[in-house]
Amino acid sequence: MVTRSEFTKYFLPVYNPGQFIPTKGKGSFVWDQKNNKYLDFASGIAVSSLGHCHPDLVDALNQQSKKLWHLSNYLTNEPAIKLAKTLCKKTFAEKVFFSNSGAEAVEAAVKTARKFAHNEYGKGKSNIVAFDDAFHGRTLLTIALNGSKRMTEGFEPLPKGIIQHPYNQIDGLENCINDKTAAVILELVQGEAGIIPAQQKFVNAIKRLCKQHNVLIIIDEVQSGVGRTGHLFAYEKYKIQPDIVCSAKALGNGMPIGAMLTSTKVGKYMQPGAHGSTYGGNPLACAVAFEVINKISKKSILNGVQKKEKRFLDGLNKINASLNCFDEIRSAGLWIGCKLRVQSRLNLDNLMQAAYSNKLMILKANNNTIRIAPSLIIEDKLIDEGLERLKKSIQQLLD
Ligand SMILES: Cc1ncc(COP(=O)(O)O)c(C=O)c1O
């Protein structure tokens, strides 16, 4: 049996995983090597939105695994075409590029936007406006977009032409979004920052300036997309017409896949040789994602998200009323951030450990916030049970 200490021995020390090693999952439960059973309020990080090993997804993967695993992009394949067609039918998009991850979808988005601006308006229009506390990934380009020193220090020189502006601040936006801007990249809800929704008036101001200066709008829906907020994509709620959307995470429910969605007009300069990926559009990942998108776009699942969100919020408010442990509870569908009360002496890492020892998996965000992102189809009684375990974990640390 492999051990956690072997992880330390052999892995680049960029991660510090929990002490147990999970070996299997089913629905909202995960088991470790010792057969301990955990209730999952994390879904990877907002990935396994239909729970672990959903039978229909297992079936889609099994079926495809017997047919065709891989071809280069010199040839296309049926699952990729079916998935692209479905994504276009269900969203604003007319063209799709498949990647393997969220960061790669963002890379494709920025390249597509710059190419468009360059070809339509000339060389000087290349800046990308991004926002403080954003998270767009861990590649060199995406850490530059994240803008936080913590992520960029030591990795310089970074890609140029990125302008940072405070999130949800309208003042000064007009100094950043101008004729030199190719695109604005925006999360409509900042996930890694602790579930911070964009204000509608901030989004409207961006929309207005982008229109005025012919600037493209890239919406990063890697975490918010595919049902997490109770909409197939969060841009629907904000009534914004994006030029480009980045998707990943829940799109594959655990199969590595990302997608950049755009219009024919914006994508038209991305001709052969402009971009590519060995595994992008892989038949196995696309066959699963096709099932995922068809299931999650059903009204019954999306409406269920809002009902379950309410159940979570009621439960979390009750915990707060009894333990006075949160300064704020924020949510956007089944995506909930509980900011720990500063005076509570609660430490987020200790709380994660306490939750694990009470057989509950939760997430952190921004060093002060518990993040909850369960399966979108989690049963109500499991929500109540998980909240009990969370309460117990907090109580143990306060005692
Ligand atoms: C909004 C957003 N964009 C991009 C990424 C990067 O995705 P990946 O880790 O798949 O590269 C993430 C990951 O958390 C994300 O939340």
Image (cartoon, rainbow, N blue to C red):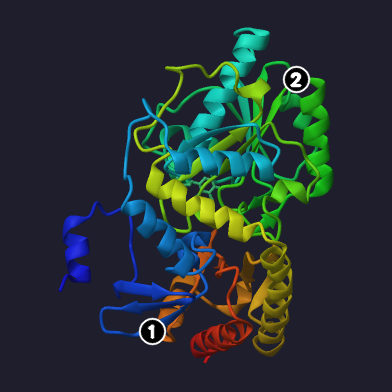
Would residue 42 be visible to someone looking at this image? Answer: yes
Residue count near mark 2 (Cα–Cα under 10 Å), binned few <14, some 14–19, many ≥20:
some
Q: Nearer the viewer, residue 324 or 253?
A: 253
Describe residue 340's horizontal placement relative to residue 240 as left or right.
left
Describe residue 378's horizontal placement relative to residue 29 as left or right.
right
Image point (53%, 44%), residue name: 83
Return the x and y of residue 77 as percentages of the image width and height. 42, 37
Q: Nearer the viewer, residue 361 or 245?
A: 245
Which amino acid, by three-letter code, is at mark 2? Answer: Asn
- Above or below — where is 166 with respect to 126? below
Residue 354 occupies quadrant: bottom left
The numbered dot on residue 8 is none
Which amino acid, by three-letter code, is at mark 1? Answer: Lys
- Which mark is nearer the camera, 2 or 1? 1
- Above or below — where is 62 with respect to 357? above
- Above or below — where is 173 with respect to 229? above
Image point (60%, 87%), residue name: 381
Image point (67%, 77%), residue name: 312
Q: Name the residue tied to disc 1.
A: 37
Q: Name the residue tied to disc 2.
A: 214
**Labelled pair 2, 1 in contact (Cβ < 8 Å):** no
Describe residue 91's horizontal placement relative to residue 295 as left or right.
right
Return the x and y of residue 379 as percentages of the image width and height. 59, 80
Return the x and y of residue 351 as percentages of the image width and height. 48, 77
Would residue 147 be visible to someone looking at this image? Answer: no
Helix, strand or loop for disc 2: loop
